[in-house]
Image: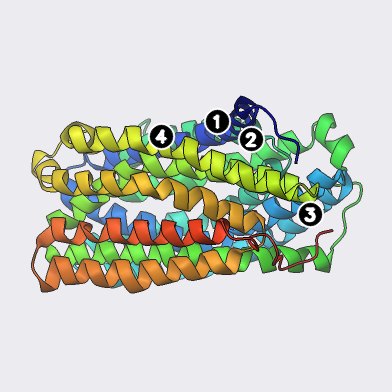
Amino acid sequence: MNLLPINSYYKKILRVALPAIAGLSTQMVVSLVDSAMVGRLEEATYALAAMGIGVLATWALVSFFSSLATGTHVIVARRFGQGNFLECGNTLNNSLIVSVLLGGIVAAIGASLAGPIAHFFASDDKVGDYASQYLFYRFLGIPFFLISVSYRGFFFGISKTKIFMISGILTNLFNVIFNYMFIYGSFGLPRMGLAGAGLGSTLATFSDVVFYLIIILLPAYRNKFQNFKHFKIDKEIIKGIFKISLPVSFQSVFVLIGFLSFVAITGIIGTKEQAATQAIISTLFISFLPLFGFGIAVQTLVGNNLGAGKYDLAKLYGFETAKVATIYTIILGIIFISIPQYVLLIITNDWSIIELAKSSLRIAGFAQIFYATGVVLANGLQAAGRTVFVMKAEMLTNLFLFVPLAYLLGVVFDFGLTGAWFAIPGYIIVYSSLIFYKYNSAEWHKEIPVKLD
């Protein structure tokens, strides 16, 4: 392996990661703005609690299928590292076929089951009613979301994360505008409350599809990757996408079902505690979404270098990216622990919710420091084909450690909201330790689930 000055690695990591982080951070800002808008409705406690259920339920369903982007990303990154540009374009074509078909089916099923899903996780009928309205409109946007995800995976794989950044800025700007219009009934539109947040997000997602279609038709991409000139259904590529993506899909679902269960547990403790939990989760996006940006960089850099046969260099990029991400989470941890009340004020001006959430945000602020290693190296393992191991690690630590421990501490032992949140550090530290152990092993990259070479 040809070693470069350490600054060269960091420059390349940041060149790929920062646009991805910027794009994901726009989602964080919109999430905070959406929560702030909903948190200022007349019945903020019910609306925030319902939004917590709605957001997590939508993600639980969408994440199962949106992880198809991982398969697209990994295959495109590998082909790009090999210099096979036509197969990069062919991979995108087949990813889009899968997204359109699955998106339509999932939207139809999700919209029809919005009510039962919402009331299953809500301990209060009014919270369930609000959540069901929000979910209905969010599910209608799933086909557009999955199409955007396919494009996202493609551009990640060819290291063009700036395209995703621009997409994120534009789409989320539309999201804020549409949500304001429909939540509060501006410009003569009906005042829809929380349901308006769902409709606004769906319209913004449609605009994202339009943006990506315009970009892929530009001569620079159309001539190099020739997506439409060589359009064909390739069963091997579709099979490869599914083999890589399905474990990631199940992993995402385990995460979100775990957090949905956690939100439901806090609802057993009390409706105000459930609202406080949603405020904390929205705040944690400040940490989590940029970490996912570093994860995107690792998948691209590891995939490109594996495709080029540079295995040691691929591994090194994972470790160096984890170091950078950990510095970021340490800084945030200091802020969350020192001034939690002012961070929470971004989400809601209800001081009873803020006072209730302060201690729990301090706990989460400590725990998220260790999450950087878990997120970054898990993406490195996924790029190397170790998606099944990452899935198993998530299932073990989330569903069989985090959720039972939260129920035990919060409900059985009656330690309340703070007790429930004490389950977070155990989950994150154990998960990150398992991921580090596997990534540091000699066989970390030797189990590719589909032949890509």
Dot 2 crowding, Cα within 10 Å, few <14, some 14–19, many 20+:
many
Q: Quadrant of residue 122?
A: bottom left
Dot 4 crowding, Cα within 10 Å, few <14, some 14–19, many 20+:
some
**Above/below status of 342 relative to 428:** above
263 or 39: nearer the viewer? 263
Give percent across and percent down for residue 117: 36, 70
Provide the secondary structure element on which disc 2 rests.
helix
Tag 4 residue: 328
Tag 1 residue: 18
**Above/below status of 18 relative to 399:** above
Q: Is residue 422 visible?
A: yes
- Structural distance between the alpha carbons of marks 4 and 1: 12 Å
The structure residue drawn at horizontal position 26% and vertical position 34%, both measured from the top left corner, is 334
Dot 1 crowding, Cα within 10 Å, few <14, some 14–19, many 20+:
some
Give yes or no for contact between labels 2 and 3 (Cβ–Cβ under 8 Å): no
Give yes or no for contact between labels 2 and 1 (Cβ–Cβ under 8 Å): yes
User: What is the number of the mark on residue 91?
Assistant: 3
- Structural distance between the alpha carbons of marks 2 and 1: 8 Å
- Structural distance between the alpha carbons of marks 3 and 4: 34 Å
